[in-house]
Image: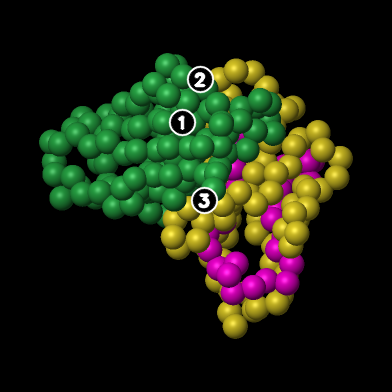
């Protein structure tokens, strides 16, 4: 079973509009962390935002926020006031557990976001 | 500037050749990782290392080898045993102090093409 599911292969959004990128996850571990990365056409993965399973509030970093719905196992990325420079691939990733050996990040297949002027 | 460097940016290999991809970090991070990315897919873990002189296999280690002789460096060798090595390779590092919150930071990547 897929641990991280991103159901939107591609999205087109008008500049200055808000956009929500979907991510659902599957784990039975009570301790986990969720990460979002941006990958521009240059290829480098850029860390955007982190949410821990025990965090009571949704994470925010500038124009990025994470809509964390634990019961639904959902961790959607919200980008407010989109800009042309937001055009990129976006990946959701998860790390499970606190035990040594669980350092692996499991990635989704990504969503390609295109901002239209 | 602190960061992660990877070289070369592009690499071409003939079948049957071993090639080594370089990864260096000056962030004083304990942990380093190698991922492979194929078109239209997410990243898959090849190898990772938490401390010098120690490393662990990831999900797709077959046909790859690594070394960790220095904290700053984690080179990846793609051997001739790797049947389909054409891909984008990304190196990452992290502080590795708390496994849940530990954030991995990535280098610019190396694109390997087998001719």
Quarter holding residue A106? top right
Name the chain letter of the residue that bears numbered label 2.
Answer: B
Q: Which chain is green?
A: B
Q: Quadrant of the N terminus of chain A?
A: top right
Q: Nearer the viewer, residue B47 or A27?
A: B47
Q: Position of residue A39 (x, y in %)?
A: 51, 56
Between disc 2 and disc 3, the foreground one is: 2
Q: Which residue is mark 2?
A: B51
Real-space CA distance between mark 2 and mark 1, rounded to the nearest whole angstrom: 10 Å
Q: Which chain is yellow?
A: A
Q: Which mark is residue B72?
A: 1
Real-space CA distance between mark 1 and mark 3, rounded to the nearest whole angstrom: 19 Å
Q: Which mark is residue A45?
A: 3
User: Is residue A85 visible from the viewing direction of this image?
Assistant: yes
Q: Residue at x 59, y 43 (%)?
A: A93
Q: Secondary structure at mark 1?
A: loop
Q: Which residues are magenta?
A: A69-95
Q: Residue at x 65, y 59 (%)?
A: A21
Q: Quick check: B22 above or below B39?
A: above
Real-space CA distance between mark 2 and mark 3, rounded to the nearest whole angstrom: 23 Å
């Amino acid at each position: 079973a897929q641990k991280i599911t991103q159901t939107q292969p591609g999205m087109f959004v008008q500049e200055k509009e808000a956009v929500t990128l979907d991510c659902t996850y599957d784990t039975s571990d009570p301790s986990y962390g969720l990460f979002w990365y941006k990958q521009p056409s240059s290829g480098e993965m850029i860390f955007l935002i982190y949410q821990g399973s025990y965090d009571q509030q949704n994470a925010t970093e500038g124009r990025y926020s994470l809509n964390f719905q634990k019961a639904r196992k959902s961790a959607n990325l919200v980008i407010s006031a989109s800009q042309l420079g937001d055009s990129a691939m976006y990946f959701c990733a998860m790390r499970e557990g606190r035990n040594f050996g669980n350092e692996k990040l499991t990635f989704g297949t990504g969503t390609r976001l295109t901002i239209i002027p | 500037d602190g960061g992660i460097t990877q070289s070369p940016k592009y690499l071409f290999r003939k079948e049957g050749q071993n090639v080594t991809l370089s990864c260096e970090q000056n962030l004083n991070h304990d942990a380093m990782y190698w991922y492979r990315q194929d078109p239209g897919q997410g990243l898959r873990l090849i190898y990772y290392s938490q401390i010098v002189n120690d490393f662990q296999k990831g999900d797709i280690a077959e046909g790859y080898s690594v070394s960790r002789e220095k904290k700053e460096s984690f080179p990846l060798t793609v051997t001739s045993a790797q049947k389909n090595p054409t891909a984008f390779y990304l190196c990452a590092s992290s502080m590795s102090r708390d496994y849940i919150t530990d954030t991995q930071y990535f280098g610019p990547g190396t694109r390997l093409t087998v001719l």
